[in-house]
Amino acid sequence: MATTELKKPLRGIVPPMVTPLLDRDTLDVEGLERLVEHILAGGVHGLFILGTTGEAPSLGYRLRRDAIDRVCRQVAGRVPVLVGITDTAFVESVGIARHAADAGAQGVVLAPPYYFPAGQAELLEYLQHLVPELPVPVFLYNMPSLTKLNFEPPTVRAAADIPGVAGLKDSSANMIYFHQLQGLFRDRPDFSLLVGPEELLGETLLLGGHGGVSGGANVWPRLYVALYEAARARDLDRVAALHERIMRISSTIYSVGRYGSSFLKGVKCSLSLKGICSDFLAEPFHRFRQEERESIRKHIDALESEP
């Protein structure tokens, strides 16, 4: 059973945790335990497992359930745990959500089912059928670059009237979209609007966003919490300085390598170099080779030598 009430709206920094792996189907259990404590020590406001940064679509269902059980048991109600349930199969999303609730998770996160190109009316009907089957609140996840589908603003507004829909994480990197949602939800202060791309974290917080699901908070959780706190305090100079630091992470750690997987490889490699967890990635990706690893090491040293 959940031991922490999910406050509405959910606010703050909710890192999308990587899934430490030893091989294709084995968790790095010791690394997972160190990573959870490392993130929580940064003062974060929640933890999101089995999302994009967690490589969930590449993981087997047994391993996903194992990760849910271990994380929820270790967190033990210190912060809310959200669990990704995105799947192409309706029943699998329901099954993972029920397992998560039984393990103590406080919420789940759902992107549109990918592969078949659903229309907006079909997406809304899907949510009307799915959400009542879920035992905990659900956050919609707008990730059009990977799902090839948008939760368009009118669809989100209509979905918010379904009991159990608690908010949305937007990873579109489209600020016009985010502002449109803010306009639609002026009468719903309980509905969370969270941003994915950390490069947009500062401005969304200053303009009324509730928080960020920031991948870099796996490695430097205190930095992202500090930015959140500075924005809440309207300390614009500090927001600007912390934003600049996050942009340096984006332009260095996330920019090593040639492929779209560079972000994930950079985060996992950084955690490995800091002695927190393994950097093994699920297929079809592989960890950084030695040359790239040395580049990440140099970037970390430069970032952490700054005052």
Image: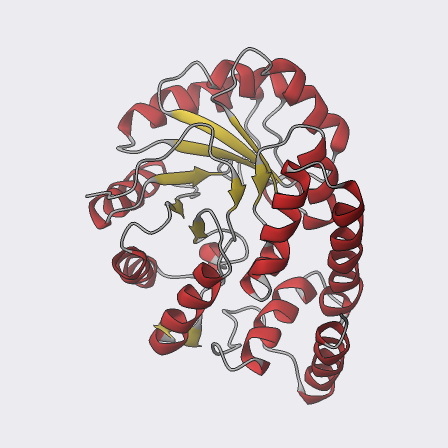
Expressed as whole percent of the image width and height from the top left, the position of residue 192 reads 52, 29
Expressed as whole percent of the image width and height from the top left, the position of residue 258 reads 77, 69
Q: Is residue 163 above or below residue 167?
A: above
Q: Which residue is nearer to you in this view: 231 or 193?
A: 231
Residue 145 sits in quarter? top right
Q: Which colour scheme is used?
A: secondary structure
Expressed as whole percent of the image width and height from the top left, the position of residue 149 reads 61, 34
Expressed as whole percent of the image width and height from the top left, the position of residue 225 reads 58, 51
Q: In this view, does 55 lie above or below 277?
A: above
Q: In which quarter of the image is the N terminus?
A: top left
Report the side of 119 relative to 60 (left or right).
right
Report the side of 189 relative to 261 (left or right).
left
Residue 67 in view here: yes
Report the side of 143 relative to 179 (left or right).
left
Residue ID at (50%, 59%): 55
Mark count: 0
- Most extreme residue toward the top is 187
Residue 196 in view here: no
Residue ID at (68%, 40%): 231
Residue 137 sits in quarter? top left
Q: In which quarter of the image is the C terminus?
A: bottom right
Residue ID at (47%, 54%): 57
Q: Which residue is nearer to you in this view: 266 or 302?
A: 302
Q: Is residue 202 above or below residue 120?
A: below
